[in-house]
Image (cartoon, rainbow, N blue to C red):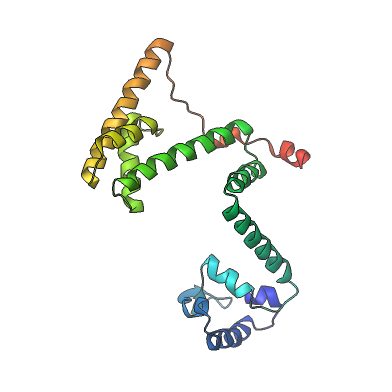
Amino acid sequence: MVQVLTDSVDGRKYWNKLKQRLKAEGNESVTNCHQLKLLASDGKKYKTDVADLEQLFRLVQSVPSKKVEPVKQWLAQLGSQRIDQMIDPELTFQMAVEDYRRQGYSDKWINERMRSIEMRKELTDEWKRSGITEQRDFAILTNVLTQAWSGMTTRQYATTEYSRQSNPTTMEESKRIAREGGEVARDARKTIEKRLGRTVISSEKASDYLRPIEDTESES
């Protein structure tokens, strides 16, 4: 990364000097960089400093280069947008809609996606209230609910209300309620399907709602 941004002949040497300076300044991003053996241009593997995305962005801010300036401006813009979103949370939803449109998703898919996010948040808030805090536990409960309902799509409203009424206090109680809530939703699905004479489970997926690339480009 340093070599690309600085056009340095020896990116490793430039990085070593930059790393020393940043360490002297007390930069935690450099301190937390780890080394892995990566394949070099000579075909051999050497211990190489690696960093995650947050660390890389921090290092970008420390590199004096014309190539880096656009990235710095972009990071400043993102920071400003994030502060605006903290002041007005509705902007977060507007940004999400714009991002999905930029990726080419149709308005129909975006509306369904935003509704499902709202449903998911309502359910996870209820789980948090009952004492569930670990992401792994959220995943387990979601899986239990999904398997009980259809094995394909999570339907959460019934489980949320059932949890509020039952007031679980342990992971096992929450699992039981998630399963029973999923069974309620499954029974409701079967009743609807019997009346309609067809299944309500769709084979549609997110990619089905992506608009053709030429349509997205012409709109831009």
Q: Is residue 166 left or right of residue 6?
A: left
Q: Position of residue 139 (x, y in %)?
A: 35, 46
Q: Is residue 72 left or right of residue 58?
A: right
Q: Which residue is farthest front?
A: 87
Q: Quadrant of the N terminus?
A: bottom right
Q: Is residue 1 visible?
A: no
Q: Is residue 10 above or below residue 60?
A: below
What residue is shown at x 44% (from left), y 37% (from top)? 119
In this figure, what is the number of numbered marks? 0
Q: Is residue 24 above or below residue 210?
A: below
What residue is shown at x 76% (from left), y 38% (from top)? 219
Res 151 quadrant in image? top left
What residue is shown at x 24% (from left), y 46% (from top)? 171
Q: Position of residue 150 (x, y in %)?
A: 35, 29
Q: Quadrant of the C terminus?
A: top right
Q: Is residue 27 left or right of residue 185?
A: right
Q: Is residue 90 above or below residue 155?
A: below
**Is 151 in front, or is 38?**
151
Q: Position of residue 57 (x, y in %)?
A: 59, 69
Q: Is residue 45 above or below residue 174?
A: below
Q: Is residue 25 visible?
A: yes
**Is 122 in front, or is 62?**
122
Q: Position of residue 147 (x, y in %)?
A: 32, 34
